[in-house]
Amino acid sequence: MLVIDKKGFADLPFWLQGPAASLAAGQERKRNSQALLIHGIPGSGRRILALWYAAHLLGIPHNRLAHFSMPDPGALEQGAMGHADFMFLQPPPEKSVIPVEAVREMIGFLQLKSHQGGARVALVCPADSLTTAAANSLLKTLEEPPAGGFIILVASSPAVLPATILSRCQRLAVRRPEPDAAVEWLRARGGEADWQLLLEVAGGAPLRALALHQDNFSGKARQLHDDLRQLAAGRESPVAVAQRWAEHDNELVAQWLYWTLSSAVRGSASGQVSTQAGIVGNQPLQNAGKALNMQTLLHRLAEVEELRRTGARAVKADLQYAALLQRWFA
């Protein structure tokens, strides 16, 4: 029976330790593919797990792996590990996609000889931001990776990637932990807060809930909610509100809208009124005096889901918000 040294992943968030152990065991037995897709919702720890596995493949000592257990997302860039055989691929500054030129550079990197005689690792995050040309360029390398070359893709869902990419990758899903255990973990790291609510807004993703708390989500949610009320009363224009919203983190705004509408849908279905985070029924979701039925709520929920899928990294977020709010409050 193979025994894996747990010291290498003991500092990871508890729900990632099982997947990390599985990856370590698979690598020890030489069963892991050279192309791995790690997927899960934002804030689930998919990127942390990917970075940990990259460090593991590169042979970084266990006493240094703790450094990668809770990395600053802003530090995930080329050279973040201080390792010449590691490459991190992400959209260029002010862009929302990974171009084909970047993938070609990555392929060239993987074909080089290792500086330290071991593996060479490329981490692509988020993989769903690859352009069609970039994804096509990656296919042959995924099918026949160079000796010692590993590619780790990080995405929100397998469904967002082309089937040709999926067929060439080993997949690993990062599951959300049980809410009670997640709340206990959050409380130990962030102190007292309404973690149950924050976790609900974050879709059950603990790292996202922690980020919301650190980013003063409660105060920003009150402002966003007040903007909806002003729109409903006709005292604000969609363009003015959209410009303010564009100053916030786009992912936060989209997530808050999704949670607000989800709460309204559940409230309408059950006949109950939600009062959490300043949300009072469906009142701020339509113009004053207009009824808002379940069909309209579900349609708006689908619009926001599309915004979350395609617009979280959009440069012209104000235009997206303006178009959305204009449809809602015309």
Image (cartoon, grey):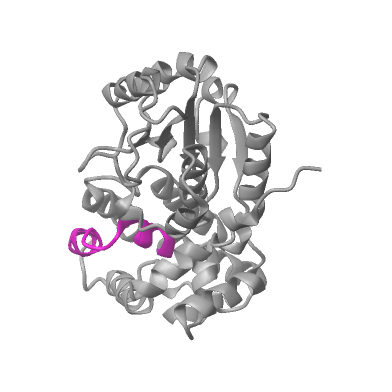
- Give the residue at the far bottom of this rendering: 192
- Determine whether 110 is above or below 83 in the image: above
Is residue 110 inside the magenta stretch? no
Against 312, residue 249 (above or below) is below
In the picture, the quarter occupied by the C terminus is bottom left
- Placement of 202 over or under 41, stated as above or below: below
Spot occupied by residue 69 in the image (x, y as percentages of width and height): 48, 58
Q: Is residue 226 above or below residue 325?
A: below
Q: Position of residue 153 (x, y in %)?
A: 48, 35
The segment highlighted magenta reads 239-256
Residue 317: x and y in percent read 25, 50
Give the number of marks. 0
User: Which residue is pictured at 35% across the width and 46% down the height?
Assistant: 81
Q: In the depicted view, which residue is nearer to us: 136 or 31?
A: 31
Q: Is residue 9 visible?
A: no
Viewer-side residue, 162 vs 176? 176
Q: Is residue 107 visible?
A: yes
x and y percent of residue 140 in the render? 47, 13
238 left or right, relative to 32? left
Quadrant where the N terminus sits is top right
Q: Is residue 195 left or right of residue 287?
A: right
Name the image quarter holding residue 85: top left
Q: Quadrant of residue 283?
A: bottom left
Magenta portion: prevailing SS class: helix
The residue located at (63%, 35%) in the rendering is 27
